[in-house]
Image (spheres, rainbow, N blue to C red):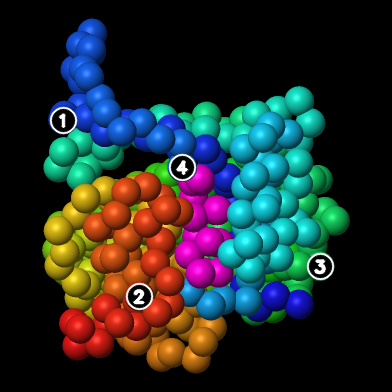
Amino acid sequence: MNKLVVLGSVNADHVLQVASFPRPGETLHGHSYSVIPGGKGANQAVAAARLGADIAFIASVGDDSFGHQMIEAFKFDGINTEGVMIEENTPTGIAMIQVAATGENSICISAEANARLTADRIAPHHGLIEAADTLLMQLETPIETIEKAAQIAKAAGTKVVLNPAPAHQLSDDLLQLVDMITPNETEAELLTGIEVTDMASAQQAADALHAKGIETVMITLGSKGVWISQDGKGRQVEGFRVQATDTTGAGDTFNGAFLTGLQSGRKLDDAIKFAHAAAAISVTRMGAQTSIPSITEVERFLLEHH
């Protein structure tokens, strides 16, 4: 069975390049419109697969052409798709993304088929979770499904990793089931009430999450890398500085790459560096899954930036 299982969302990303974000009532001319495969779950699964992970994906897609195309694309990337379900009379999830000239993005999403990924719907795929070493999830699918999957994983001894994005309030019951959590500064603040502005406040937020029963806390800090805390002891692992073109999917690439690094036997800090490299490459390219590098590209980047 597969060592890593990702449970999460699949979206069609409708991407438009704009000079700046429009103000209310303002119409701007964009350019370079494209439809790109996205969704946090799919992005993380594809990143892991392209970087060499042994992986299965549990998700719901629509019965539209995009949904069918996505399943074929996942197979092409080497993902076990037996847990990817087609929802009848439902479109695949969508994201409307504007990318400004600065590289920043503005995103609106509609769950569509992702909302059909209910706790009952994943019942036939409990075995995938139970047989895996690690289960990785995000927050673009129903929260009760995430809780159910975490319960199944916990009972089977499968490690639960939660990337709590997009930012969302979470119950202590769910957090107690999580072995590792990977929020950014905004998500960490929402979960703990502590504003993360520097390394000291990152550790305070980490301590609050440890107190909820989470063993490993990794707070991503953008260009400053990550703050990783275990047993109440934290440290910064710096990232790489590159010229960003589009940051869409960078966090997803990081999460998928990080767990792939661990799966391949890298030590914790090496796995973080590996993930930093993958994310750094991804922000120099357009789109979510279209920007995810291969393992060869990541290894070459690490050699060049040693």
Q: Quadrant of the C terminus?
A: bottom left
Q: Which residue is mark 3?
A: 127
Dot 1 amino acid type: Ala
Residue at image coords 39%, 67%:
293
- Residue 297 disc label: 2
Distance (Cα) linking label 2 and label 4: 21 Å
Question: Which residue carries the number 1 mark?
Answer: 19
Q: Which mark is residue 36?
A: 4
Q: How far apart in space, not on screen, are marks 4 and 1 (Cα)?
A: 20 Å
Q: Which residue sits at x=70%, y=75%?
A: 2
Residue 47 falls within the magenta-colored stretch: yes
Q: What is the three-letter code of the residue carrying label 2?
A: Glu
- Do tag 4 and tag 1 residues touch (Cβ < 8 Å)? no
Q: Does residue 203 show up?
A: no
Q: Is residue 41 left or right of residue 192?
A: right
Q: Nearer the viewer, mark 4 or mark 3?
A: 4
Residue 80 left/right relative to 274: right
Q: Callout 3, which amino acid? A: Gly
Q: Which residues are magenta?
A: 37-50
Tell me where residue 1 appears, x and y as whole percent: 76, 77
